Every structure is written in C-alpha cells, then in structure tokens.
Amino acid sequence: MKAIVMRRYGPPDVLEYETVPNPEPRAGEIRIRVHAATVNRVLDVSLRAGNEPARGAVLPLIPGVDCAGVVDAVGSAVTRWRKGMRAAAAGVMPLEICPEDGRGYDGPTGMMGIKRPGGFAEMVTVPAFAAIELPDGLDFHHAAVIMRHVPTAWNLLVNVAELKTGESVLIMGAGGNLGSIGIQIAKNVIGANVIAAAGSDARVATGLALGADHGVNYNVADLEAEVIRLTGGKGVDVLYDNIANGKVLPRAFRALGFDGRLVTAGAHAGPNVAIDFAHLYHKRITIKGRPGYRPSDVPKCFAAAAEGKIKAQIERILPLSRAAEAHRLVESGESIGKIVLDPTRG
C-alpha cells in the first residue's frame, strides 16, 4: 500500500510518500481502507516539526491521528464488524492485542499516528472497540473531521462546562476547528446564546454563518466591553477557549460573569496567560482544563452531524501524496477550515 512515512523530524519534506507492506489485523482488530484523514496543527504538524517531544512519538512512523473509511478485513475473535462497514477511528488506543470489547486490557496505550501507525495511509489497523460505525448520509471527509474535533468540543461544553439552554457562551477562535464546532454544539445542540470572537472580520463572519448570535473582532473592538454590552452587563456564563492568546484571553476572562466557567483543551498561542485573580474570586469563576472526550458521547456527536446540527468546516481535500503541501498550508495559518487527505484520490 501507499503511505506517508516520517523517519525524522523537520520541515514538511521529511514526509515521504512510499510503498510499505499492507498491515494485517491482529486478534481483536479491524483494518480500515482509509478514505479520509485530517491534518492537525499540533498532533501532526507541530509533531513533525519536532516540537512535541513529550508525546513520545515512535519513529519511523506513519502519521495521522484519525481516519474514516471502509472496513476491508477483520482479525480473529472479531464479531461486531464485517467487511464493507463504514468506520472512523481516532485517539488513544491499546498498542498490544486486546479483546474485541477492550475489557480487561491493562497493557500500554498510545495515540494512533504517534505511537502506532496512523491514518496517512491507504490502510490502517485499529482495535475493534476503538472504531465507531458511521451513520448513513455522512461522507468520509466530514466524518474524519467530526471524529477529530466534535467529541472534544462536546465534552468541554456539555460535560465540563455544563452549559445549559438559555445560558451565554463566548467562543474564542470562532474561525478555527474547535471554535467552529463549539459554536454549533452550543447553538444547535444545547440552545445557548453564542458570542463568536475572532481576530478578523472574515473569521467572525464564519462564526455568524454557523449560527452565532453575535460576533466580535477582538482586533477592532474592546472584547470585554463588547461582551458585557451584549449580555446586558452580566457577562457570559461560559468562556470556551483553546488558544490561550496572551493578549486576548485576559480580556475574555474579564467578560465572565458570576459563577462563570472557563473551559479549555488547548494552548496553541500560549501557554502563559495572565488573569485577574480578583475577578476570579469575586465572580466565583471555575477554570477547568480537560483534553479528550467520553467514548459514550461519540455516537451522539455523529448523530448530531447526521441530523445537520453540526457540519465540519473543510477548506481543502488533497490526495495523500500531497501530505507535505497540506502541512505547509496548515503551518501558513491562512486556512480557516480543515485540510483533509484522501488516499483514494490520485
């Protein structure tokens, strides 16, 4: 099969497109013929550049921390999956042989595309329990993006922040992947009042088009003052941020109201941000960082996507052979939507 292989860290050109042996599913595993894999700023691009040593990547490596496609082989002891079923997989999973349902496994784990072969390939094997069947009507490209971002955003807003219908939420990075997904979950799934914040009019417009009630360009307006005005002086109930911009987040934090909650699963522009501790304790604010997601929420995320409540923002779909170009596009910071690689495209 064809795959992207990374043998060393460095610029995008270290990503080699080459022929490698087809992977064979072990007991309790399935093999997915990949139709889509997303390119991620941290877990793919920053990792490839050598900026994520703490993640312990095992080189040489086939990157790609998610995928969506068709099951084309199953290992022994697998009964739930069969050839032809549509599946997606992502995230941390067992590295050694485990039962089909994953129960009782106590061996080492790691993220696909970092500690085990990932989705930048024509085929990839994953533990059967780590994959989820895709609902009808959801194409592979959008499914891969949903698998990558929606469960994390869902966990932050639904489980961690406990955002309620009618409450207000300030979504930072409205034009980004987690931001755009957060807007849709907050508005279309929960029924909150959404304020979308971004650093350009174009990205604010993206947030408004996705359903936000209000938008603020924080490079033009005073973010704190504008949010306070939009909430009638109360401030927002929830601040959703995955960027940690040292110049912007302090103003957003000041826009949190009484019993406000700040939730985050990222620090792309951080990590160090100054906050007003007087505001923290006077307003009884809670700050929670929570990466990852609850596996039980993943089917809910795909169901919401299939119902049209959540739509992934895809900027470009490229053949697998153009992975280096995809990395350059992400590094440029100019793309708004997701870059997706499709191994079935020539």
Image: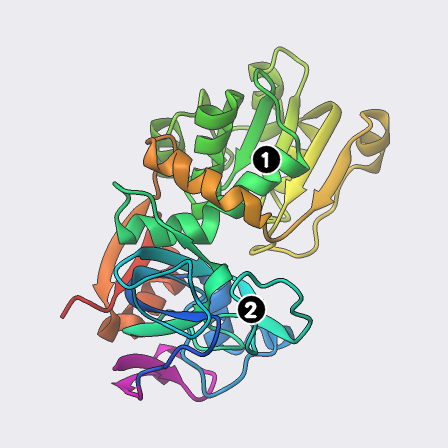
At mark 1, the secondary structure is helix
- The answer to which image quadrant residue 103 occupies is bottom right
Instruction: Out of 329 and 140, give the one closest to the viewer.
Output: 140
Q: Residue furthest left?
A: 346
Q: Amino acid at mark 1?
A: Leu
- State the scheme by which the image is colored: rainbow
Residue at position x 61%, y 40% in the image: 156
Tell me the number on the disc at residue 99: 2
- Quadrant assignment for the C terminus: bottom left
Q: Amino acid at mark 2?
A: Pro
- Quadrant assignment for the N terminus: bottom left
At mark 2, the secondary structure is loop
Q: Is 196 included in the stretch rendered in magenta? A: no
Tell me the number on the disc at residue 157: 1
Residue at position x 58%, y 63% in the image: 102
Residue 125 located left or right of residue 219: left
Instruction: Out of 256 and 192, give the one closest to the viewer.
Output: 192
Q: Position of residue 252 (x, y in %)?
A: 63, 34
Q: Is 2 included in the stretch rendered in magenta? A: yes
Q: Is residue 333 above or below residue 231?
A: below
Residue at position x 69%, y 71% in the image: 106
Q: Position of residue 113 (x, y in %)?
A: 46, 72
Instruction: Out of 205 and 126, give the one closest to the viewer.
Output: 126
Count the marks. 2
Task: Give the residues drawn in magenta, as a range.
Answer: 1-21
Q: Position of residue 219 (x, y in %)?
A: 49, 37
Question: Earlier along the polypeptide chain: callout 1 or callout 2?
Answer: 2
**Could you tell me if residue 251 is visible in this image?**
no
Classify 10 Å Cα crowding around label 1: few (below 14), some (14-19), many (20 and above): many
**Could you tell me if residue 41 is visible in this image?**
yes
